[in-house]
Image (spheres, rainbow, N blue to C red):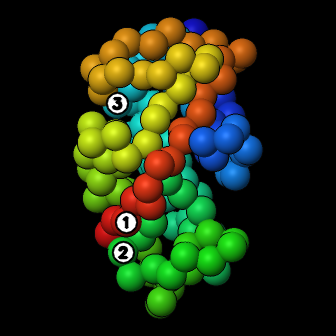
Amino acid sequence: MSAITLTIKDETAGGKTTNEINVSFASELTTVKEIITARVTAEVDQYNNKMPEYFKGLVEPGDAERTLNGFKLKEKRKVDAEKQCLIALDAFQKNGFFLLVDNIQSESLEQMVVINTNTNISFVKLTPLVGG
């Protein structure tokens, strides 16, 4: 079985897409926790490999300034993926954002999800998430 790559979207409550990232999963059966962790890790890796001016991601790195283009770090540095993941998982449990899989709201981190190349995954942020 080969990896499944999905385009994960960030959407507003009104359904407007604000960001997209491609994320690969090892199998069709995964959990909500694994989806969140894979997404956050992918965007941190993407940032850390290129070190662009702006970080676009689910969790705003600490010491960053929100701009129209993403989050601008006050000084260029690597972002800690593990720390960002912990903040994102905690935020999910506190309803800081919704995770929709094929337009169905995920209920818990341990919820099992079957994915394929046609699966739609969207993150709907309710409040800004600030991390490390």
- Which residue is label 3 attached to? 33
- Amino acid on which the number 3 mark rests in the picture: Lys
Sequence-wise, the earlier of marks 2 and 3 is 3
Q: How many marks?
A: 3
At which x and y percent is residue 91? Answer: 32, 47
Q: Toward the viewer: 33 or 126?
A: 126
Question: Residue at point 45% right, 66% down?
Answer: 60
Q: Are marks 1 and 2 in contact (CB under 8 Å)?
A: yes
Tag 1 secondary structure: loop
Q: Is residue 82 left or right of residue 22?
A: left
Q: Is residue 71 above or below residue 40?
A: below
Q: Callout 1: 10 Å neighbours few (<14), some, many (20+)?
A: some
Q: Indicate the quadrant where residue 35 lies.
A: top left
Q: Toward the viewer: 118 or 51?
A: 118
Where is the N terminus found, in terms of image quarters? top right
- Which residue is label 1 attached to? 130
Q: Is residue 38 visible?
A: no
